[in-house]
Amino acid sequence: MSAIIFMASCTPDETVAVTEYKPVLVDRAELVKSVKMEGIREIEDAGKIYRNGNLLFINEKYEGVHVIDNSDPTNPTKLGFIKIVGNVDIAMTGNIMYADNAVDLITLRYDGTGVTVLDREENVFPEPVAPDWGSIPEEFNEKNRPANTVIVKWVKK
């Protein structure tokens, strides 16, 4: 009976959630400029994989997309890395890629050597939340952090 009384005496105001993560903030202007082709890098935290012809596009969670020529599956060749800050998902139609750039939806074209952003729809997606709970802590919401910043990922404190 005492456990029921204890639970009944707690109110939401008394509960303070603490996350073991801190947000990585990026200025909106930097977010827009962040999409670019870079050299190859090792895959560290693979996400979704998309196949388009002989090419594989492998998401590196919150970082971008690895481009791999898989013409010879016994010897795949890394071609480069498309940096897309805050990226966790991609889809393709023909040679057009759709990707999340943190909170924005971007449309881009990979031409074999480079990437061109064709369109950007701002604030289509919610900001990512800390991995250990389902909402952004009050201290990191938009009104309590530097103006024009976007959460692109969370890292352990």
Image (cartoon, rainbow, N blue to C red):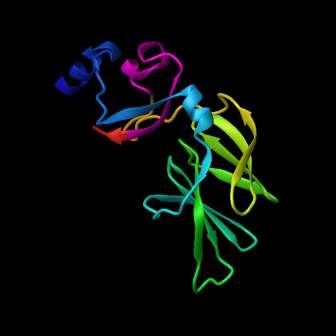
Tell me residue 146's x, y (percent). 44, 17
Whether 140 is among the magenta residues is: yes
Which residue is nearer to you in this view: 18 or 106?
106
Instruction: Pick the quarter of the image with the N terminus.
Output: top left
Q: Quadrant of the C terminus?
A: top left
12, 25: nearer the viewer:
25
Nearer to the camera, 18 or 61:
61
Residue 25 image-quadrant placement: top left
Q: Quadrant of residue 59?
A: bottom right
25 w.r.t. 84: above or below = above
**Left-right relation of 144 to 72:** left
Report if residue 123 lies within the magenta region.
no
From where the camera sits, is residue 68 visible? yes
Q: Is residue 5 left or right of residue 102?
A: left
Q: Residue furthest left?
A: 2
Image coordinates for residue 136, horizontal then vertical, percent: 44, 27
Q: In the image, residue 44 lies at what x, y percent?
A: 43, 61
How many dots with numbers? 0
Q: How far across and down, in percent of the image, does residue 36 sit?
A: 61, 47
Range drawn in magenta: 136-154
In the figure, 13 relative to 137: above or below? above
Residue 66 visible to the viewer = no
- Residue, x 54% and y 20% (percent of image)? 148
Extreme residue toward the right, this view:
94
User: Closest to the observer: 46 or 132?
Assistant: 46
Left or right: 68 with respect to 145? right
Q: Residue at x 42, y 14 (%)?
A: 144
Which residue corresponds to the image point at 50% horizontal and 16% vertical from the top-left?
147
